[in-house]
Image (cartoon, rainbow, N blue to C red):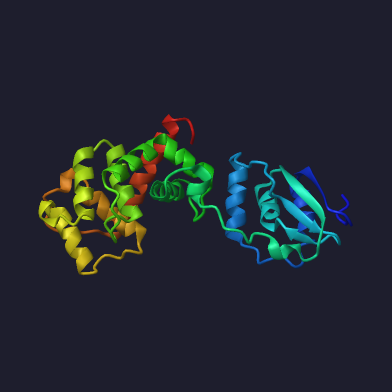
Amino acid sequence: MNIICEKPTAEFVTVTPEIAKSWLELNIENRRHRGWWSSALANAIRRGEWIVSHQGIAFSSSGILIDGQHRLHSVVESQTPIKILVTRGLSEDAYKVIDTGMKRTLSDLTGISIRTAEVCRHLARMVHGGSVTTAMECEEIYKCGVGEVAEELQDFCNTSIKIFSAVSVRVGAICLILDGHDKNYIKNLYANLCHQKYKELPPIAESFVRQANDKRINANSKSDLLARSLKVFNPQFENVQKLIITDADCVSANAFCRNIVKNLLAKNEVY
């Protein structure tokens, strides 16, 4: 297939792994390849989530690849052909204006509220693995029941406060509700934490507050915060005086939430 083209042209082409590999040899002056993003795209392609759009592969008039290296790498990695728009004959310096616009957020792509999108992204990473998720993965999480509960919790208490309204805390509360625990108990407890109504907290939540105030909680550890929230919001631990979390608790917390969502996805026939 001739890549050299003096005038700009564009057409949809089915790009096979073999074609993608040959075109990557023309990747001379592109930005640094980010393997994690290629792998994320490859996983999406394998799941059948590739959607044809105006974004694709671009070559300069001399045949140099100036856009689309990650898409090509994902085709090679997934070993799956995709249909994609291929543009040829662009100016040699066209790369300077590629991908310079404002990036769309997950909320922009799905229409899901920002705080609920955070929850769906967090759970999608648990279910599918990796650090990158697609909009489709997050929509699946939203539609399986997570979105409804997340929105209900947000409507009940939309206050943001450090640690107590963190995404890991909300995920813990939501997964316990989805597991059949007392919804009103959990919602009221979450609101009391966010509104700092500490006198209305049960002993386990008081311990949580003390640990936060004493900076004994690693707010950067999502697994640790999730494990704590699963105990704090579980009515069975209501009267426990001291909140203690082990490494095993962190592993179990992730597994618990992952299984809750996987079961919901299976029931909705979207997983």
**Taking 23 as reference, is 93 above or below it?**
below
Q: Position of residue 205 (x, y in %)?
A: 17, 54
**Taking 181 as reference, is 122 above or below it?**
below
Q: Position of residue 52 (x, y in %)?
A: 67, 41
Count the marks: how many?
0
Tell me if residue 182 can be seen.
no
Q: Look at 39% across and 46% down and name the residue there.
A: 116
Image position of 172 (left or right of 100)? left
Q: Position of residue 208 (x, y in %)?
A: 20, 59
Q: Look at 74% across and 52% down and name the residue there.
A: 57
Tell me if residue 17 can be seen.
yes
Image position of 42 (left or right of 214)? right
Query: Which image quadrant for residue 195?
Result: bottom left
Q: Look at 74% across and 48% down and name the residue there.
A: 17
Viewer-proximal residue, 90 or 125?
90
Viewer-proximal residue, 264 or 108?
108
Viewer-proximal residue, 235 or 3?
3
Query: Which image quadrant for residue 188?
Result: top left
Q: Look at 61% across and 50% down and name the residue there.
A: 41
Q: Position of residue 260 (x, y in %)?
A: 36, 40
